[in-house]
Amino acid sequence: MLEELRQCEVCPFRCKVNRLEGKIGRCGCKDKIKIALASLHYYEEPGISGNNGSGTVFFSNCNLNCLFCQNYKISQEGKGREVSIEELADIFLDQQKNGANNINLVTPTSYVPQIIEALKIAKERGLKLPIVYNTNGYENVETIKMLNGYIDIYLPDLKYSDNELAVRLSNAPKYFEIATDAIKEMYNQVGVPIFNEDGIMQKGIMIRHLVLPNNIENSKKVLKWISEELPKEVYVSVMAQYFPTYKAKEDKYLNRKLTNKEYSEIEQYLYLLDIENGYMQDLGKHEEEYVPDF
């Protein structure tokens, strides 16, 4: 599996860097796994965090360069520490011992080969929790196919319907086509969400979308694609938590929060679509306070 890193094409940039020799890919990653944090996280959607929390592992670096990234210290500046595959497996098992509802792999794309090896080890040692793949959506279908059988829950972003916007804000060419192809493969693998008796997701796909100021049409087209291309039972999480940070503070279109008018327009549009399930974040609340709304 690690041979995939010899001429790395794990993400859509396909930079072909030999990471096994310690060379750094377009994403900022070498062959070593780098993580910024592993902890119980209580601020995901209710079906992910529940009362016990989600066993998150935040991976350092990212294959996107979002101007507005709220975790830019981790994703863009590479904050974190290196761990071995065996250590990562131990982290998964520790999360299980701590009572986590799941193992939540945050920004995992660049480390898929190593993560698969760590999951093999952890499962042999008794890991039984659902595995969540929490991604920006900019994924190769081939990489998602590698994960088939290892991932129970896919939690992808669908950030952009506008490819020009994707390039300007995240340096992500052909984002919409690439992300939607990947999401279709994710759905083919895990289907619509299945919850246990406590309301905790055990399998399926939930798609996230962050509404950006001055880009309401982008959001409408994203939601329209979901309603037309996926079953109505698929869960959607519409997020209002945007605030100007990192390079967005200097961007005239991004240097403010959403207005009530903008978010209300998205809310009204959402109710016109054939989407039955999900969460709509309260504009006046922080990201940890999700309110089931549709």
Image (tube, rainbow, N blue to C red):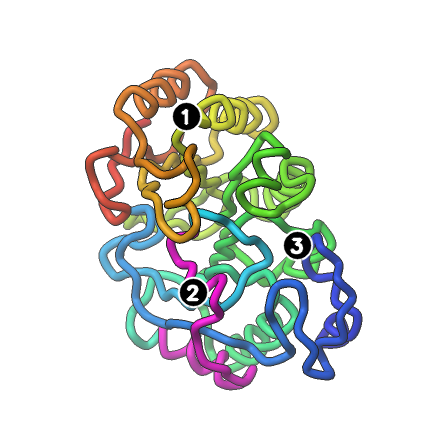
The part of the chain drawn in magenta is 69-95
The residue lying at 53 percent from left, 50 percent from top is: 136
Q: SS at mark 2?
A: strand
Amino acid type at circle 3 is Ile
Q: Residue 213 location, x and y as percent? A: 39, 31
Q: Which residue is mark 1?
A: 276
Mark 2 residue crowding within 10 angstroms, few (<14) / some (14–19) / many (20+)? many
Mark count: 3
Q: Which mark is residue 162?
A: none
Q: SS at mark 3?
A: helix
Amino acid type at circle 1 is Glu
Q: Earlier in the sequence, mark 3 or mark 1?
A: 3
Mark 1 residue crowding within 10 angstroms, few (<14) / some (14–19) / many (20+)? some
When asked about the image quadrant of residue 30, the answer is bottom right
The residue lying at 75 percent from left, 62 percent from top is: 15
Q: Residue 21 location, x and y as percent? A: 73, 83
Amino acid type at circle 2 is Ile
Q: Residue 163 location, x and y as percent? A: 63, 34
Q: Earlier in the sequence, mark 2 or mark 1?
A: 2
Q: Which residue is mark 3?
A: 144
Q: Which mark is residue 103?
A: 2
What separation in Å lies between label 3 and label 2 (alpha carbons)?
Answer: 17 Å
In what quadrant of the picture does the N terminus appear? bottom right
The residue lying at 28 percent from left, 34 percent from top is: 292
Above or below: residue 21 compared with residue 178: below
